[in-house]
Amino acid sequence: MKTMKILVACVILLLFSQATLAQDTKIGVLNALQALFNSDAAKVVQEELEQEFAGDEARAGELTAQLTKLREDYQQNSAVMTQEQIRRMNSNAQDLQVQLQLINERVQKALQEKNQQFLESMQQQLAAAVTDVVAEGGYDLILNSDATPYFAPVLDITAKVTAKLNEKAQAAN
């Protein structure tokens, strides 16, 4: 009986000590993609992409304007147009739409590739920034924000990680 009391007391003491330890656990929540894509390095890549695709963007704008003009012309003149004129106008519109779609697909594919390259090139820097933020903040646990249905905004360390990425990039330059 005495052994049972000692065992129960030890279990209660163990549970109490674990509860106390759990109360001291410091938790952070991180959106790693947001931290990366808000960084200064991402802004530089974004500017490069804008310059690289400026021609495609201008061409897409021209094609869109031509399509708009064709639609307006059709709406205004369809009552007096011959079947041949309507067929030619539809054919021209389809050609413009195909060109616009090809430009959009090419740009989307290039953007996906550039984003993937950026993510791969930044993995080590991100890991180092997270490690530094964890060490400086004394965090015991970091959760992925996408896998966390709810968290208080005070737990979000995304901005801290972005700041650390920027700080490390400036130090490297």
Image (cartoon, rainbow, N blue to C red):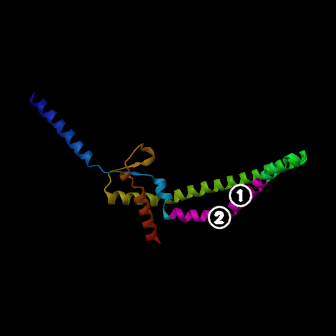
Q: Is residue 39 above or below residue 154?
A: below
Q: CA distance from mark 1 to mark 2?
A: 14 Å
- Is residue 105 within the magenta segment? no
Q: Quadrant of residue 22?
A: top left
- Image spot of residue 59 (x, y percent): 72, 60
Q: Residues within 10 Å of mark 1 (few under 14, many from 20)?
A: many
Q: Which residue is identified by label 2?
A: 52
Foreground residue among 7 and 46: 46
Part of the protein shown in magenta:
41-69
**Which residue type carries mark 2?**
Glu
Magenta stretch mostly in which secondary structure?
helix
Q: Nearer the viewer, residue 75 or 165?
A: 75
**Residue with the mark numbered 1:** 60
Magenta region includes residue 61: yes
The three-letter code of the residue at mark 1 reads Ala
Q: Nearer the viewer, mark 1 or mark 2?
A: 1
Could you tell me which quadrant the N terminus lies in? Answer: top left
The residue lying at 74 percent from left, 60 percent from top is 62
The circle drawn on residue 108 is none
Q: Is residue 82 left or right of residue 66?
A: right
* Residue 165 vs residue 122, the one in the foreground: 165
